[in-house]
Image (cartoon, helix red, strand yellow):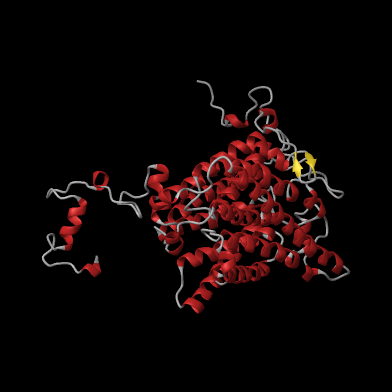
Amino acid sequence: MAATNPVPLAYQTTGEGTLAPDWLNKGDNAWQLTASTLVGLQCVPGLVILYGSIVKKKWAVNSAFMSLYAFAAVLICWVTWAFKMSFGEKLIPLWGKAGPSLDQKYLLQRADLPSTGTDFYPPLAPLYPMATLVYFQFVFAAITLILIAGSLLGRMNFIAWMIFVPLWLTCSYTVGAFSLWGGGFLFQWGVIDYAGGYVIHLSSGVAGFVAAYWVGPRLDKDRKSFPPNNVLLTLAGAGMLWLGWNGFNGGAPYAANVISSMAVLNTNICAATSLLVWTSIDVLVFKKPSVIGAVQGMITGLVAITPSAGLVQGWAAVVIGVLAGSIPWYSMMILGRKRMFQKVDDTLGVFHTHAVAGVMGGICAAFFAQPTLCNLFLSIPNERGIIYAGDGHGQRAVLQLAKQICGALFVIGWNVVMTSLICLAIKSVVPLRMTDELLTVGDDAAHGEEAYALWGDGEKFDATKHGAVSPLGLTEHDGDQALREGIFTDHPIELERL
């Protein structure tokens, strides 16, 4: 009987090209794929669940579907042309050359970001295959589009959304990603964006707000009353978002190293601090804690730490958490109710939770970035925050603040202009907003489906559709009337209790 080979097939040399390359670090590769999956789970099912449950019942299906569609559409666009526009060879200082990322030879070679070389260091070359890097960066792109959807829930024409996703990914996301991460002009200048405070959160918050302006508002009655249809599922989605952020910030160094460990811990510290601060302010101002408020505080904490998660000390993560739980709270709960913000119907307040928190986090990086941690991650040596400006580094530290502000202004300006152009282009082909008649009904009108097997929220009663026959020969409508008259009870039921 032949002896069995204890070495798994994947580790054997079975033919030409099957030997594991010398550059492959299996630990880094395993962590990067895990981190990618964690961020993917933030999207599907994390934000699918959160969006589907935090909105009014009649919009549950539409809101969840917008997330699911975006995840799938971004992937196909990403591997067909957008990855190389974001992380490939430089075309111009803010854009890479478009091209497919589907060839086996390309995907199995060592990961490489060819435009990230600086005067101080060679281009980044993580110790795993290009396929891993392509997928890791895809989930970041996908979640950005899904965050934009949060501003548009409850009224955007789904066909318009189908067109918007590839256009915005191509014309806006790729510019921010290349400029700040892929070796573009902001990367070369030394703007700090550790894991996407600007590339993902500021851009999605601004783009969502601008798109919401062009799409138009929800129905007045929906703006006045838009209660979550399932708060417990909202918490479930929020929990997946929180823990998924370990992959978000933990995967940013492209390796399972000390910076990724620091980033994961700081991420959780900041999120917890921000949640507690937001909830405490709710109690002080409104005299009761809000579950939805706690979720918002959690999100702002996660967003605010993202620009510097692996570059600051633990105590700084607490400080950033305090700011994240208070400044966006004021922006959303006080300024957000002013006429200026009320003119634009940002359904979930993505501008406040992502744009405001993202800018704030980027500015905080200019104050709290620790020099040793920066040297372990950044491609420009000796970057530092203002509080570490001693020993003759004061001018350099102040310059970092200017860099962070300029980087934010570029991302804001590009997204305002490009998102407006995209919306106007789509509007010339299909309506951006559903008609009032469709908005009155919701999911059933938009998709022919409902989230719950209950008579709809806002839907007009149709006896042929909703009038199921009861054992007593009564329709649901008749049964409801009979219940009110006490047929099914010993005593009549007060109408106030129904």
Q: Work out whether residue 186 or residue 414 is closer to the camera in this orientation and state it.
A: 414
Q: Work out whether residue 445 or residue 408 is closer to the camera in this orientation and state it.
A: 445
- Tally the marks: 0
Left/right of residue 175 with respect to residue 280 in the rendered view: right
Q: Work out whether residue 11 or residue 139 is closer to the camera in this orientation and state it.
A: 139
Q: Position of residue 222 (x, y in %)?
A: 43, 59
Question: Does residue 398 show up?
Answer: yes
Q: Is residue 310 above or below residue 69?
A: below
Left/right of residue 448 with respect to residue 370 in the rendered view: left
Quadrant where the C terminus is found in the figure: bottom left
Residue drawn at x 73%, y 67% as measured from the top left: 368
Classify residue 427 by image quadrant: top right
Residue drawn at x 65%, y 60% as measured from the top left: 358
Question: Does residue 226 show up?
Answer: no
Residue drawn at x 67%, y 33% as measured from the top left: 101
Q: Residue furthest top?
A: 1
Q: Is residue 442 above or below residue 382?
A: above
Q: Position of residue 438 (x, y in %)?
A: 42, 48
Q: Position of residue 419 (x, y in %)?
A: 64, 49
Classify residue 243 by image quadrant: bottom right
Residue drawn at x 50%, y 54% as measured from the top left: 240
Q: Position of residue 103 (x, y in %)?
A: 67, 28
Left/right of residue 396 with respect to residue 147 in the rendered view: right
